[in-house]
Image (cartoon, helix red, strand yellow):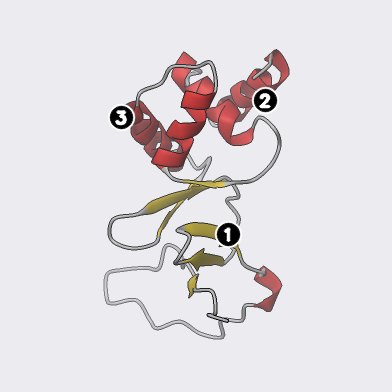
Amino acid sequence: MNRTTFQIGEGWLAQVGLRPTRQRVVLATLLVGDGCNRHVTAESLYASVKQSDASVSLATVYNTLKVFSAAGLIREILVDGTKSYFDTRIDDHPHFYWEGENELTDAPKEQLEITSLPKAPKGAEISKVDVVIRLRRKEI
């Protein structure tokens, strides 16, 4: 990580008014410092931290991802009841979940058509719709 990528991470935090603590800047830089979108789990981001020269605990990674998500910087995608992925691309778009590889990737948005949704129960409103298409490799 160099000064330019740190500045990108700091700027990303500043756009939503998050205080740029050392740990937040490190994690922000790993998430968006190269300008690429990515899907991470807390564990995969922690592995990236360990490969860098930074020091951030796994608990801090979990907590910071939740803070980033609440601030609208990333989207949390729940794949099953126990596994969350975090997506730096925050526009509405579907995902492929590769079951055998435990990997989440973007699916082509332009190929998805949702023509209607069920009405929300009385006293509720739909806040978002997540589309996760589960895939497995065909056996040859």
> Considering the image in quadrants, where does the N terminus appear?
top right
Give amino acid for label 3: Ala
Separation of residues labelled 3 and 2 (CA atoms): 24 Å
Q: Secondary structure at mark 1?
A: strand
Can you see residue 107?
yes
Contact, CB < 8 Å: mark 3 with mark 2?
Answer: no
Q: Residue at x 50, y 66 (%)?
A: 98
Q: Residue at x 40, y 83 (%)?
A: 118
> Considering the image in quadrants, where does the C terminus appear?
bottom right
Q: 10 Å neighbourhood of mark 3: few (<14), some, or many (≥20)?
A: few
Residue beneath disc 1: 105
Judging depth in this view, the residue of 114 and 42 nearest the camera is 42
In the rendered structure, find residue 59 and report the number of the disc placed on it. Answer: 3
Contact, CB < 8 Å: mark 2 with mark 1?
Answer: no
Judging depth in this view, the residue of 60 and 121 nearest the camera is 60
Give amino acid for label 2: Ile
Can you see residue 17?
no
Q: Left of 130 or right of it: where is 11?
A: right
Please tell me whether mark 2 or mark 1 is closer to you in this view: 1
Which image quarter: residue 29? top right
Q: Earlier in the sequence, mark 2 or mark 1?
A: 2
In the rendered structure, find residue 8 and report the number of the disc placed on it. Answer: 2
Separation of residues labelled 2 and 1 (CA atoms): 23 Å
Please tell me whether mark 3 or mark 2 is closer to you in this view: 3
Give amino acid for label 1: Thr
